[in-house]
Image (cartoon, rainbow, N blue to C red):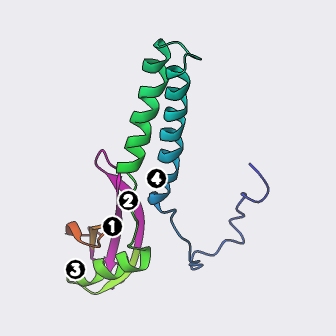
């Protein structure tokens, strides 16, 4: 572990809520383009006779497949954490106390989804819920609320 990555529990602050940004998955388009350009380059070498035609199946086809997948799985991640928390707050139907959000990915195209865990304002919380918010268009995909057993 590098010194920069080490966390000292004595100096960490649980209330420290820094703004951070999740990397936009639309960056996959750049990687997909590199794979497809590589496939075209290999295909050109094969057509020119520099490589054997058996290379077509072992190099070009997988590069095209991976590049195409990257192109169709490149979602523009428009909904940020704050927006997901606000959407969950509006949807859940109870006063929200503590809440946290984490990103997951759903489906074979890996669509980004915010999983927002919320607790009501009681001390200690008597109800908790989970709201799944689409990371692309902000729609509520699913929600669940339950009583917390003390």
- With 51 as the anchor, is 89 left or right in this view? left
In the rendered structure, find residue 39 and report the number of the disc placed on it: none
Element at label 1: loop
* Residue drawn where x is 52% and y is 52% of the image: 30
Residue indicated by mark 3: 91
Q: Are marks 2 and 1 in contact (CB under 8 Å)?
A: yes
* Residue drawn where x is 55% and y is 33% of the image: 41
Spot occupied by residue 94 in the image (x, y as percentages of width and height): 23, 84
* Residue drawn where x is 20% and y is 83% of the image: 93
Q: Nearer the viewer, residue 77 or 81?
A: 77
Q: Is residue 122 visible?
A: no
Query: Eyeballing the image, is 148 above or below 34?
Result: below
Extent of the magenta region: 100-127
Of circles 3 and 4, the one toward us is 4
For the stretch drawn in magenta, what is the main secondary structure? strand
Query: Eyeballing the image, is 52 above or below 144?
Result: above
Residue indicated by mark 4: 29
Q: Is residue 110 magenta?
A: yes
Q: Are marks 3 and 4 in contact (CB under 8 Å)?
A: no
Q: Is residue 57 magenta?
A: no
Element at label 2: loop
Spot occupied by residue 64 in the image (x, y as percentages of width and height): 42, 34
Residue indicated by mark 2: 75
């Amino acid at each position: 572990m590098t010194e920069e990555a080490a966390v000292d529990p004595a100096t960490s602050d649980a209330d420290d809520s820094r703004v951070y940004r999740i990397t936009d998955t639309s960056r996959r388009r750049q990687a997909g383009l590199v794979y497809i350009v590589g496939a075209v380059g290999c295909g050109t070498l094969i057509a020119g006779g520099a490589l054997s035609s058996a290379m077509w199946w072992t190099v070009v086809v997988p590069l095209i497949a991976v590049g195409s997948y990257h192109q169709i799985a490149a979602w523009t991640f428009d909904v940020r954490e704050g927006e997901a928390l606000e959407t969950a707050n509006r949807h859940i139907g109870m006063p929200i106390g503590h809440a946290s959000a984490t990103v997951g990915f759903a489906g074979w195209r890996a669509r980004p989804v915010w999983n927002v865990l919320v607790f009501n304002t009681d001390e200690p919380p008597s109800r908790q819920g989970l709201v799944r918010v689409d990371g692309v268009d902000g729609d509520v995909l699913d929600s669940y609320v339950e009583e917390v057993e003390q």
